[in-house]
Image (spheres, grey):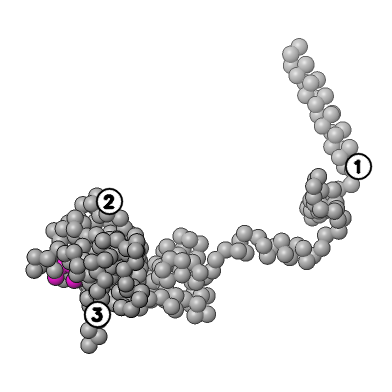
Amino acid sequence: MRRGVRRVWGRSLCTENRKSHENRQDQPAFSCSHRIACSRDNRVARSLVRRSFPGPGCAEPSPFVDDRRLQTARSSHPRAMEPTLADWLTQRGGVAHTSTAAAAGFGPRVISAAVATREVERIRRSWIVTPDCPSSRKRAASVGGRATCVSAAQNIGLWTPTREDDHVWVPRSASRLDETGMRLHRATAPVPMVRTDPLEPTVNVLFHVARCLPPVDGLAVWESALRTKRVDADTLAAVAWRSVRASRFSRVATFLSDSGLETHFRELMLTIGVRPRQQVWIDGHPVDALIGERLAIQIDGFRLPQFTGGPASRPSPGCSADSARLHRPPIRLRPDPV
């Protein structure tokens, strides 16, 4: 009995399937291209409906689609507003490794096209730079390193002494390098860096400065970093320096020196037992150094009109006691240009 039921049930299913198949054969057949065209027409129709009947507060409905509006929309697409390789390099200091550029979306074809149009320059095989990139960074890329010490300090706007060579950091394993016109640094700085990163942080720059330059010049660069707020005193105190001189600079460096010449003058006075006071305000104007109670010193020739003689230099009724003591022309020290 069960077999009969199954047989009847199977026969009835076959009959229904055959009928549905015959009904489908009676309907007109649609090709794949026709179905794609229909779906495209549906999308266009929905777009026209949305343009023709905007929501409340929108502009007047327009049932027509203007090609110029579509072109403007395509040009304002976020992908069209992406920066070029040259702009991206400029934002990163003008130099980058090709692997970093590839991670940012600039593949080998984009780099080759930019090099062909001379928008960027290729250094060695894996470094690219902009035409206006600082020479120290180009030299560093030519040996697979990065600019550091006074070269990096000058690039970020710090006071630096006169230099002739480019200071470049390279790994300890680097060998067979052309060191002409360069001074190589191989010490391990406090802040760990990826080898392909071309820019040194300020802490690493100060570390190499402390190890490389004479003590007074190195301290002047440190105080310039504090003065320009490239780094703060709390950060310097928290760093685990791997240099005795850098540790001492972190304790004695201040932000009172406007230039390296003021640091040189202060250190010179300290060696002979004189402790000057820096940036002392007298009658509304600062002086670079004050020794004792009456000797005011200007290191860079900063002009103070009330100290040049004449009626402007006479004491006013509301003049403070300190300014009254200093109504003589101050001593001005200027560096010898020779």
> What residue is shown with label 1?
26
Q: Is residue 307 visible in this depiction of the protein?
A: yes
Res. 205 image quadrant:
bottom left
Residue in the picture at 46% in, 60% down? 103
Res. 92 image quadrant:
bottom left
Kind of residue at disc 2: Asp
Mark 2 falls on what kind of element? Answer: helix
Left or right: residue 225 versus residue 173 is: right
Residue in the picture at 91% in, 42% down? 26
Query: Which of the two marks, 3 or 2, is nearer to us in this view?
Result: 3
Kind of residue at disc 3: Arg
**Residue 135 x %, y %:** 35, 78
Q: Quadrant of the N terminus?
A: top right
> What residue is shown with label 3?
334
- Closer to the chain start, of discs 2 and 1, is 1
- Closer to the chain start, of discs 1 and 3, is 1
Mark 1 packing: few (<14 Cα in 10 Å), some, or many (20+)?
few
Mark 1 falls on what kind of element? Answer: helix
Marks 3 and 2 sit apart, C-alpha to C-alpha, by 33 Å
Mark 3 packing: few (<14 Cα in 10 Å), some, or many (20+)?
few
Residue nearest the observer in this picture, 129 or 227: 227
> What residue is shown with label 2?
234
Above or below, comparing residue 62 to residue 16 in the picture: below
**Range covered by the magenta-colored residues:** 264-268
Query: Which of the two marks, 1 or 3, is nearer to us in this view?
Result: 3
